[in-house]
Amino acid sequence: MTGAVSAGRLGVVSCHACGLVCQDTLPQASHHRPVAESEACGNGARGRSHQVICPRCGAPLHRRRPNSIARAWALLLAGLIFYIPANVLPVMYTSLLGSGSDNTIMQGVIEFWKSGSYGIALVIFIASVLVPCTKFVVLGVLFATSQRGSRWAMKERAKLYRMVELVGYWSMLDVLVVAVVAALVKFQGLSDIEPRIGILFFGMVVIMTMLSAMSFDPRLIWDGDTE
Amino acid sequence: MNDTTEARPQPGKPAIIRRRWGISLIWTVPIVAAAIGISMLVHAWLSEGPEITILFHTATGLEAGKTPVKYKDVTVGAVTAITLSKDGSHVKVKVALMQSAKSLTSKDSRFWVVRPRIGASGISGVDTLFSGAYIGVDKGQSEDTASEFTGLEMPPPVVGDMPGKSFILKSEDLGSLDIGSPVYYRRIQVGRVASYQLGESGQDIKLQIFIDAPYDRYVTTNTRFWNASGVDVSLGADGLKLKTQSVSTIVAGGVAFASPMGRQASPAPKDTEFTLNADQGAAMAPPDGEAQYIQLKFEQSLRGLSVGAPVQFSGVDLGHVVSINLDYDPVKHRFPTVVGVLVYPERMGRVLDKLPKLEGDNDKQAAVFMHAMVKQGLRAQARLGNILTGQLYIAMDFIPNAPKAEMDVNARPINLPTINGSFDRMQEQIANIVAKIEKMPLDSIARNLDATLVNLDNTLTQVNRQVLPQTAQTLQQTQRTMQEADETMQQARQTFGNVDSLLAEDAPLQQNLGQTLQEVQRTSRSLRVLTDLLGRHPESLLLGRPQEPSAVTTKPPAPTTKEESTK
């Protein structure tokens, strides 16, 4: 697809940390990069025994992030698992004049929707349900296609990845809201808001998906193209 | 380079193990996540308690998903759903209890809705004013569990594990008592009425009261309970008495108890049955002992006799009337009144010991004893207790000269002969008098009287017409006469004045009269001299005076005068 020559073909490798391009002295197994990478993620691990260090900054050199897809998958899965209790367990305890109740995310959304605050309901829904869900799907698609070295819609996938990274910053919105509100609304007896265990799981979901997206090496998207 | 790759699969073998290691290292993250998730699930599943259904009349204040269930103010569950029962008469409240609250599902656990309540005995549930209602639980004692409960409409005044004891009070009626009514001991509130229910026969009421520790030890086996409700006004020989407990008992009613002085008794065990007396006096009275039912048949109307009227024997209150019924006597065609009375022989006190001991059961003894007494003139009598109200009471007394009556010793119930009451006899006498009055020929008397009155009227008219004018004339004449008399009197007075003037000392008449009288005296003296002379010398009338007139005349007169004066 591209006429550009990849670093691998030129026999050079760039340092992840400082961007220095140096000669590829990494073990040969990884030479067959596209195949090797897509086979499994063993290369980096094998390379570890022959650690090659950046001559300038001393960071270990590797052609692709080691074990990238496996890590991404593992973290995504962890995120997915955490997403279940994040939704099932209450995230917030609100008490107004002594009558308190635990609320899960969906309960909150439904309550706001029913009471006519469609805007707030929508914001919460998008931030805590829609975004994480699409993130799961997008990341899943990205990982799966990259793993298989698919050549399908590579530019779009790269765009998707950038979008996921961007959205990642804002994924903690829910957690932030709960934290701020819980800290601010402390009127003994009159009104009280406390975080509940669900929000912790929600935070874990966000962290896991962010880590997952981070551990994914976007260059793998293009690896299918090299062959 | 490509060639070398093929040449190196061999050293890759050990790397596979490393690879696995590497894989498993990163895969621990989702495994840990899954473990956490599963542990949460397991925890949730384990803490999932039993689900129960509670029936309430109304779901006021209850909200599905929000209303908590609290035991000892700890949330042990929540309402998950509220539905109507099939027939729509109840509300079914589904409650998911926590695992730790499993013990609350025993069969006799009680559930109620705690909401703000204002009653005569106080305000409760204020804390729910803001927080909203919640369902309260009282843990039951039963081993069996249940999944369906009927909720109480009112919070129970006594909750399971409070220290104290409950007792049963038997009463004829509830009075103004209610659940939660206070129980007082020396006017300290020591407990409350927990529940009440009709006895199985429907003849009495069983009240369950709860006395808090440590006061429960003051309830002994001979403790007396009485209804301390309201105001007790009594008018006795020593004036008007007004007795109350606290103000709240006036409104809400209450129970009080005390033990008779000077008697040692052990604390009563739990659920002991006591009798709830109507008032303190009745409660503290000595025990009545066994009652003896006696039937009395009165031939008279017993207006004024009511159930509960006292039965007295020689002025001692022995019992009370329990029934008043009409009977029919087919022989005499009369409706006698049958009065049933309960007599407590124990009330006679120490006299009982002096009475002769008899054989047989109580009834037999009483019958034999009474038979003997009837022979001595014992009779029942309805007497007037209060002249103002006409209230009657039954007196059992020895009536002198009572008509003979037979008493069947073997009849049950015991039938005591009666005699008509004193008041009734008085009534009879009055009736007799009235009858006699009725027999009088009042009509003819009235007629005669009428005629007489007519005559009298005529006579009076006549008198008016004839006699009175004459009388008037007579009176005028009399007046005239009187005037004349008056004149006469005046004349007489003048005459008297004249006479008076005549008679005055310096009056000439007086003087003349004196002179005249002296003249008369002198005359009479000379006359006497003459008569003496004539007596001695009658011949002198013819012959004249004798010779020695002076000596002779002067000498003799003296004795003659004497003679005259003595005569």
Image (cartoon, rainbow, N blue to C red):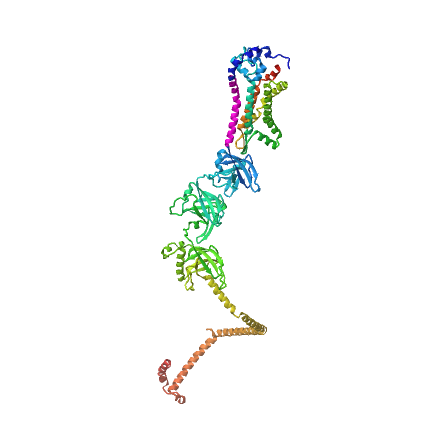
Of the pair B253 and B197, the residue shown nearer to us: B197
Residue A53 x, y percent position in the rendering = 53, 12
Q: Is B294 on the left or on the right of A150, as rendered?
A: left
Is residue B24 a member of the stretch shown in magenta?
A: yes
Residue B362 x, y percent position in the rendering = 40, 55
The magenta segment: B18-47
Of the pair B131 and B1, the residue shown nearer to us: B1
From what the image shows, is residue A127 above or below residue B513?
Answer: above
From what the image shows, is residue B552 above or below residue B145?
Answer: below
Tell me which secondary structure the magenta stretch mostly adopts. Answer: helix
User: Which quadrant of the structure image shows residue B395?
Assistant: bottom left
Of the pair B173 and B508, the residue shown nearer to us: B173
Is residue A109 a member of the stretch shown in magenta?
A: no
From what the image shows, is residue B155 above or below residue A117?
Answer: below
From what the image shows, is residue B91 above or below residue B513?
Answer: above
Residue B211 x, y percent position in the rendering = 44, 42
